[in-house]
Image (cartoon, grey):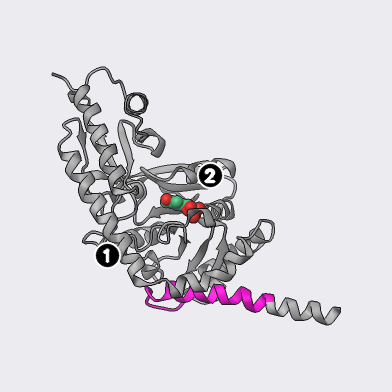
Amino acid sequence: MFNITVYNMQRLHSIASVKLWAIANYLSSDLPYRLSPEDVFLTVGGTQAIDIILPVLARPGANILLPRPGYPQYDSRAACCQLEVRYFDLLPRRGWEVDLDSLEAMTDDNTVAMVLINPSNPCGNVFTYQHLEKVAETAKKLGICVISDEVYAHVAFGSNPFVPMGVFSSIVPVITIGSLSKRWLIPGWRTGWIATCDPNKIFQKTGIVANIISYLEITSDPLTFMQAAVPQILEKTKAEFHVKNLDMMREAADIFYDVCKEIPCLTCPHKPEGAMAAMVEINFSHVKGIIDDVDFCIKLAREESVILLPGVTVGLKNWLRISIAVDLSDLQEGLSRLKAFSLRHAVS
Ligand SMILES: *Cc1c(COP(=O)(O)O)cnc(C)c1O
């Protein structure tokens, strides 16, 4: 009996490291150095990665810098662990780049990290190598680490290639959040990871790695059969699968952008080139009878059965967040209803 238990434990450990090796190898292929399995922690989707990393960094009086617009899970999680949130702006007319001046201005000795989402949900941009390098340099100067939410890694279908923040981890330590949900289109399978990209071992020296390990001991793991499937999914998915999905997203972005240009009350400052959504600004001088973004979305839902997220939910009042990750025929239908609605409410 005892021997069987020992044997099973050893087998479990070897299975455990197989999937961590697979993720480490997968991520390392885009990095200038190699991650080891000790740098990787499996999570129940990107969501649990956020749920773990924020309390791990929180301490009394600490604050974290979040992008505006951003992903609301960060705000909710920060509130739950009493981490003060400060917002830095992403600049719509500069391809949604980080406003580095505002970032610097709001950082103080209690700032623990900044979050960057690349490719960006909700903005749909993909940050350039040059800009990411500037962000890394700024974070280094400010003495904060970078949490790089890369759940949309490689979902880049425009001219900017996806560059992981980990490329700059010799400048600044980076916590990468990844997931199978988006690139593999399996959000319900709940599998993701945290990777510490930190060749200088700063996270180890400051106890952050130990805190992640302790946190994982008091929470649940992804489904066992998903854990076993991770290496297959990462290593054996055919290139055509990704190519086909990116082609579809590129076409969706084209359709979306073209219709937007035909709607006078909506402006999309930056054509989506990554992730699965875009932000458009409502020009209230072109509409009547609508008071704000929430009102716009409620009336659109009532009149046309089209559901959009009001910008206020992602931090930008009087904008709209539009998901383009739907069947192209549904996208076309939805956009034509949005156009009909906007024209019906236009100032004559
Ligand atoms: C979807 C998403 C997540 C959560 O990922 P899951 O694997 O679905 O839990 C985290 N961050 C961003 C920016 C997302 O869009």
Residue 144 seen anywhere in this rendered image of the structure: no
> Which residue is at 52% across, 63% downward?
193
Q: Is residue 309 above or below residue 24?
A: above
Q: Quadrant of the C terminus?
A: top left
Query: Depth check: 226 or 284 in front?
Result: 226
Q: Position of residue 301 (x, y in %)?
A: 36, 28
Give the magenta range: 12-34
Q: Where is mark 2, residue-wise?
A: 78
Taken as a whole, is the magenta stretch helix, strand or loop? helix
The answer to whether residue 40 is seen in the rendering is yes
Q: Which mark is residue 294?
A: none
> Left of 343 or right of it: where is 201?
right
Q: Residue at x 48, y 46 (%)?
A: 74
The verdict on label 1 being within 8 Å of ligand 1 is no
Left/right placement of residue 1 relative to residue 100 reads right
Q: Position of residue 233 (x, y in %)?
A: 48, 69
Q: Is residue 149 above or below residue 314?
A: below
Q: Residue 166 versus residue 200: which sits nearer the camera?
A: 166
Please tell me which of labels 2 and 1 falls first in the chain. Answer: 2
The Cα atoms of the two marked residues, 2 and 1, are separated by 31 Å
Q: Secondary structure at mark 1?
A: loop
Q: Position of residue 133 (x, y in %)?
A: 31, 64
* Mark 2 element type: helix
Question: Quadrant of the rendered structure where residue 297 is?
Answer: top left
What residue is rendered at 26% in x and 45% in y?
A: 91
Observer-nearest residue: 189 or 52?
Answer: 189
Residue at the right extreme?
1
Query: Can you tell which mark lies on residue 161?
Result: 1
